[in-house]
């Protein structure tokens, strides 16, 4: 262990073990099931409607949309499917480019590739961890303007896909203003930001539509699942059609009027998710209290800085994070924490460093994204760590 990491590790271990009374393994982020999960799942089983048709799917879609500040929700099997279906429905496909942050989870980019489009990777903003608006503007200014849009390296720039990293909501309104001048549509990857907001507006409601995730380690889980939220009714209807195999109503016959996707969320998963959604406020309250405790813990710590929400953002603090001085210090802290039975994880490898994406287009030197990748460490973030906070 280096001198750089030792102080941060000691503070964190002492806080979790002594202040919070955590014994044994401390997970990075464990789901909390303290509501009506068992009741709803049992009711779903008793109804026999455990697959893709059922009241829980409808209720879950409505609640997710409402809590995202949107009128319509379409549940999917996972967040990747939600992004793919959304981009496909908006016409993104072969020959198109989608602006993506170089620092993101790989599902963001895989969904772009599923459409036949290609990503173009841009740098991050240190304050929000997300896509740099300044870099987006510089990139678009460098593109070739044509009658049908802007082009880069012989491909049309069709969309921008910002990601709200760890619940830090970027300024999508400003991003949309920048992109609109070039005919580029903005959609949000809000997989990590359910319940977060910026300037009083919910993540997911800041663009034409957004994709959410309900994986087992998210703030709210369905076991595995995703959703698309939007205020565009026509878009929602089209998304529902395409994600349910594009089956058209033709009496008793099975008739599909175009290629669709079997991206439906089972009713069983939606039952679990609905019970989770009822506790969303409590989950976020606990996670924000934990963030306050962490901020105080690392105040004045020379070798670690807590990653705090930027101005205007009300984060859900999906995953709490600290920044260490350099890559060596981060790796030492990671090993030391795991040796203590405390789960932590580094940020993702930059997309341009993955073998199958190494030849992808990029703009700029990605200096900030690389810095975040090298220094950021996620630390235990479960809402259940705050046992004094009422979650329900």
Image (cartoon, rainbow, N blue to C red):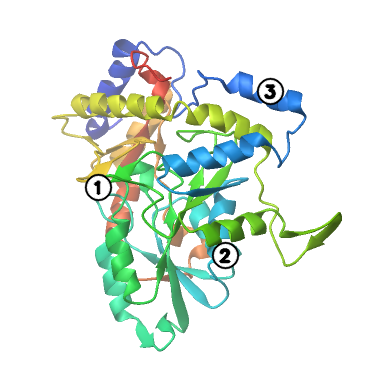
Residue 140 in the image: above or below residue 212: below
Residue count near mark 1 (Cα–Cα under 10 Å), binned few <14, some 14–19, many ≥20: few
Residues under numbered marks 2 and 3 in contact, where contact means CB atoms less than 8 Å apart: no
Residue count near mark 3 (Cα–Cα under 10 Å), binned few <14, some 14–19, many ≥20: some
Which of label 2 and label 3 is nearer to you? 3
The circle drawn on residue 10 is: none
Residue 242 in the image: above or below residue 281: below
Q: Is residue 119 visible?
A: yes
> Marks 3 and 1, how far apart in space?
39 Å
Could you tell me residue 194's position as x and y percent?
A: 42, 40
> Marks 2 and 3, how far apart in space?
34 Å
Residue pointed to by mark 2: 89
Q: Residue furthest bottom?
A: 147
Could you tell me residue 319's position as x and y percent?
A: 38, 36
Question: Which residue corresponds to the image point at 59% horizontal and 57% vertical from the top-left?
Answer: 237
Sequence-first tag of 1 and 2 = 2
Residue count near mark 2 (Cα–Cα under 10 Å), binned few <14, some 14–19, many ≥20: some
Residue pointed to by mark 1: 199
Residue 242 in the image: above or below residue 54: below
Badge 2 element? helix
Question: Which residue corresponds to the image point at 28% horizontal and 24% vertical from the top-left?
Answer: 289
Sequence-first tag of 2 and 3 = 3
Badge 3 element? helix
Residue 302 in the image: above or below residue 264: above
Which of the image's four quarters has the C terminus? top left
Question: Which residue corresponds to the image point at 52% horizontal and 57% vertical from the top-left?
Answer: 233
Q: Is residue 9 visible?
A: no
């Amino acid at each position: 262990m280096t001198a750089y990491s030792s102080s941060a590790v000691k503070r964190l271990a002492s806080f979790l073990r002594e202040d919070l009374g955590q014994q044994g393994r401390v997970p990075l982020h464990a789901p909390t099931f303290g509501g009506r999960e068992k009741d709803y799942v049992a009711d779903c089983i008793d109804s026999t409607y455990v697959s893709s048709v059922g009241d829980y799917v409808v209720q879950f879609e409505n609640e997710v949309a409402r809590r995202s500040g949107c009128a319509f929700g379409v549940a999917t099997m996972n967040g990747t499917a939600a992004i793919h279906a959304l981009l496909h429905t908006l016409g993104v496909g072969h020959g198109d480019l989608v602006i993506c942050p170089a620092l993101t989870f790989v599902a963001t980019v895989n969904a772009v590739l599923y459409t036949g489009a290609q990503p173009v990777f841009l740098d991050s903003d240190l304050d929000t961890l997300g896509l740099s608006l300044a870099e987006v503007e510089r990139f678009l200014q460098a593109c070739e303007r044509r009658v049908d849009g802007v082009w880069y390296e012989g491909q049309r720039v069709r969309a921008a896909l910002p990601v709200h990293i760890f619940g830090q909501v970027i300024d999508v309104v400003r991003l949309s203003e920048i992109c609109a001048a070039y005919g580029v549509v903005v959609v949000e990857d809000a997989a990590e930001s359910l319940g977060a907001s910026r300037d009083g507006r919910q993540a997911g409601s800041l663009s034409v539509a957004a994709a959410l995730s309900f994986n087992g380690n998210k703030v709210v889980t369905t076991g595995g699942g995703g959703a698309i939220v939007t205020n565009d009714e026509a878009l929602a209807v089209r998304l529902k059609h395409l994600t349910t195999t594009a089956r058209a109503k033709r009496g008793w016959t099975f008739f599909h009027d175009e290629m669709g996707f079997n991206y439906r969320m089972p009713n069983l998963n939606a039952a679990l998710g609905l019970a989770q959604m009822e506790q969303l406020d409590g989950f976020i309250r606990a996670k924000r209290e934990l963030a306050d405790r962490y901020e105080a813990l690392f105040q004045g710590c020379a070798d670690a800085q807590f990653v705090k929400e930027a101005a205007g953002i009300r984060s859900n603090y999906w995953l709490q994070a600290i920044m260490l001085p350099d890559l060596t210090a981060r790796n030492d802290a990671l090993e030391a924490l795991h040796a203590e039975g405390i789960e932590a994880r580094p940020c993702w490898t930059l997309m341009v460093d993955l073998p199958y994406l190494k030849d992808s287009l990029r703009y700029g030197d990605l200096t900030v994204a690389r810095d975040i990748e090298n220094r950021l460490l996620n630390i235990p973030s479960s809402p259940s760590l705050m046992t004094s906070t009422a979650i329900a």
